[in-house]
Image: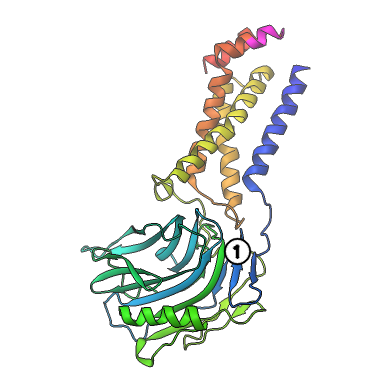
């Protein structure tokens, strides 16, 4: 009877872990809809807008980090998180990106150093999303560094945060990130790219005219590369009103471009609360698997090293989940989860091998002292 009960429990635990790790089992619909009564798009839980091609900066100066981007938006939740926009090239998913980080705005970029190498760096502008209201964000890059303007007013200037040459080039995603899903929820009201560093009077004028008239007044000498007004109100294409010939596409199904397969743990690691919270959940989630499967293997007495076998089984289950997650756009595929899941399995095995467990088995009348003793020596 104990064997059948353990079999049912093990099957239930395994099915629960697989369901939590792989749900949803398909690519959901792309949660992007047109706003009613005004220009713009509304992005839901799984929403993304993708550039149809790569942006070029033909008018920018060679070997100089010159350019500007303007994005007019309204967050769906405050506080919240997610990627607002991301420029990337094949093999380089962190060329430049903007993120909502709780109530702050975070810039992430591959910053070049003196050894012709790059490092990933972050720059924060505090309390940009303190309230759930529209924000007009402008990022300028030039020889003097990087500047962040909110609603036409300077919010942060960082001379040391020097972006790479032509930072706003390559493929682009709005409302999500390449490589791994990081959806942002809210409304996109306008977006523009320039191949030069805008001056404070220029960007202030753009803010005033765009927010009041629905379209910015842009002079020919301001180097406008792309302009999206989101004024189509229907369909799956957002037209460029400048000369980039790159339209934006709204896929029918949610998709992540260049999705990463088993991202190394040293690239996933961060000192953020969300990272450690996810790690703790992964450990706790696999404790039942380690406990139940170790108990089943001890009862069966068909494996000499039941504890080690249970831990290896947990690692194999985790590896299977992470491999399958690489083909599911709503999930992350990374090695950190394998490590934390295996650790959780080991904790479950330790719980089974504890004195409390032996006493419980004795209390329910199962004569397994020798078998548990074998497990404790594994």
Report the front residue among 20 and 289.
20
| Residue 261 in picture, x, y percent from top left | 52, 54
Residue 145 colored in magenta in the image = no
Which residue does the image show at 38% across and 62% down from the upper left? 107
The answer to whether residue 220 shows anywhere in this view is yes
When the figure is inspected, residue 231 is found, relative to residue 367, above or below; the finding is below
The residue furthest left is 114
Q: Which residue is mark 1?
A: 47
| Residue 51 in picture, x, y percent from top left | 53, 75
Which residue does the image show at 73% across and 26% down from the upper left? 7
| Residue 29 in picture, x, y percent from top left | 68, 63
Secondary structure state at the residue bearing disc 1: loop
122 left or right, relative to 229: left
- Magenta segment, prevailing SS (helix, strand or loop): helix
Which color scheme does this rendered protein use? rainbow
Q: Which residues are magenta?
A: 360-365
Report the front residue among 346 and 255.
255
Q: Dividing the picture into quarters, in which one does residue 288 lie?
A: top right
The answer to whether residue 169 shows anywhere in this view is no
Mark 1: few, some, or many residues within 10 Å (few <14, many ≥20)?
many
Report the front residue among 305 and 324.
324
Report the front residue among 333 and 323.
333
């Amino acid at each position: 009877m104990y064997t059948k009960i353990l079999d049912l429990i093990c099957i239930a635990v395994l099915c629960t872990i697989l369901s939590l790790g792989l749900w949803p089992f398909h690519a959901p619909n792309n949660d992007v809809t047109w706003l009613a009564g005004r220009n713009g798009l509304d992005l839901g839980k799984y929403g993304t807008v993708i550039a149809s091609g790569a942006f070029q900066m033909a008018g920018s100066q060679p070997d100089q980090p010159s350019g500007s981007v303007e994005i007019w938006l309204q967050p769906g939740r405050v506080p919240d998180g997610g990627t607002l926009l991301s420029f990337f090239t094949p093999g380089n998913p962190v060329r430049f990106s903007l993120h909502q980080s709780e109530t702050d705005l975070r810039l992430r970029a591959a910053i070049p150093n003196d050894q012709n190498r790059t490092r990933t760096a972050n720059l924060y502008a505090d309390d940009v999303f303190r309230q759930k209201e529209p924000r007009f964000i402008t990022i300028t890059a030039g020889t003097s560094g990087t500047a962040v303007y909110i609603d036409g007013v300077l919010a942060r200037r960082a001379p040391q945060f020097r972006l790479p040459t032509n930072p706003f080039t390559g493929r682009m995603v709005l409302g999500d990130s390449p490589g791994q899903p990081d959806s942002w929820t809210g409304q996109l009201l306008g977006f523009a790219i320039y191949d030069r560093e805008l001056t404070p009077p220029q960007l202030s004028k753009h803010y005033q005219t765009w927010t009041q008239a629905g379209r910015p007044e842009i002079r020919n000498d301001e180097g406008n590369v792309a302009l999206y007004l989101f004024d189509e109100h229907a369909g799956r294409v957002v037209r460029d009103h400048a000369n980039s010939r790159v339209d934006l596409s709204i896929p029918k199904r949610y998709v992540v471009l260049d999705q990463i397969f088993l991202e190394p743990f040293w690239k996933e690691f961060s000192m953020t609360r969300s990272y450690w919270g996810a790690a703790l959940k992964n450990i706790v989630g696999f404790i039942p698997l380690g406990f139940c499967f170790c108990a089943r293997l001890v009862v069966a007495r068909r494996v000499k090293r039941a504890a080690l076998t249970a831990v290896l089984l947990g690692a194999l289950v985790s590896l299977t989940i992470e491999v399958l997650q690489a083909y599911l756009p709503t999930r992350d595929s990374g090695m950190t989860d394998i490590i934390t899941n295996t650790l959780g399995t080991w904790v479950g095995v330790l719980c089974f091998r504890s004195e409390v467990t032996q006493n419980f088995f004795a209390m329910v009348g199962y004569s397994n002292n020798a078998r548990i003793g074998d497990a404790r020596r594994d």
